[in-house]
Image (spheres, grey):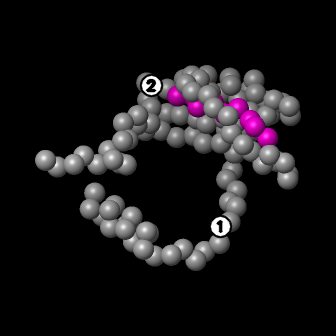
Amino acid sequence: MKALALVLALLWVVPAHAEPHWAAKPVQCSTPDEVNERQLSNGLKPFIGMVTNARIDQNIYELPVVMFYSPDDGSFAIVEYNYDSEIACIVFIGGAVDFDVADYFFPKKST
């Protein structure tokens, strides 16, 4: 925890000189039906939905995003849907979902 505090302190003091850049991550895309079936066949169920702003060419679109989750093994997938184009993309997959992360951001004060 002290190491994390030191790193955060250094980041606060040291100015950033690098210009931001766009990075491309590999994503898997298909029809919404096929992507949904893949999640269900992997034991993932829709858990939470949200809306994101996505840049496509030079335009911004509001697109639905769904987090699929398996409480059995803690795995998850984040899927972005573009129904106008009949496409859905698996943007992230992973595991070790932790719903109790407040201590990382708000450490307990010693008494």
The picture places residue 19, in percent across and down from the top left corner, at: 65, 72
Q: Quadrant of the N terminus?
A: bottom left
Residue 68 magenta: yes
Camera sees residue 44: no
- Counting residues from the N terminus, which is met first, the one under dot 2 or under dot 1? 1
Residue located farthest toward the left when viewing the structure as drawn: 111
**Neighbour tally class for label 1: few under 14, some 14-19, many 20 plus, Cα within 10 Å:** few
Give the structural element (helix, strand or loop) at label 2.
loop
Q: Could you tell me which residue is drawn at 70 percent across and 61 percent down?
A: 22
**Mark 2 crowdedness (10 Å alpha carbons): few <14, some 14-19, many ≥20:** few
Quarter of the rendering containing residue 81: top right
Identity, as a three-letter code, of the amino acid under mark 2 = Pro
Q: Which mark is residue 20?
A: 1
Tag 2 and tag 1, C-beta contact below 8 Å: no
Is residue 84 visible from the viewing direction of this image? yes
Q: Secondary structure at mark 1?
A: loop
Q: Which residues are magenta?
A: 61-69
Q: Nearer the viewer, residue 77 or 101?
A: 101
Q: Amino acid at mark 1?
A: Pro
Per the picture, the main secondary structure of the magenta-coloured stretch is strand
- Circle on res. 32: none
Q: Eyeballing the image, is 27 above or below 79? A: below
Residue 34: quarter of image: top right
Instruction: Identify the residue at image location x=68%, y=60%.
Output: 23
Q: Quick check: 25 left or right of 75?
A: right
**Image spot of residue 78 (x, y percent):** 61, 36
**Which residue was labeled with disc 2?**
71
Query: Can you say whether 75 is above or below 106 in the image?
Result: above
> Residue 80 lies in magenta, yes or no?
no
In this view, the mark in front (2 or 1): 1
- Give the residue at x 74% y 45%: 54
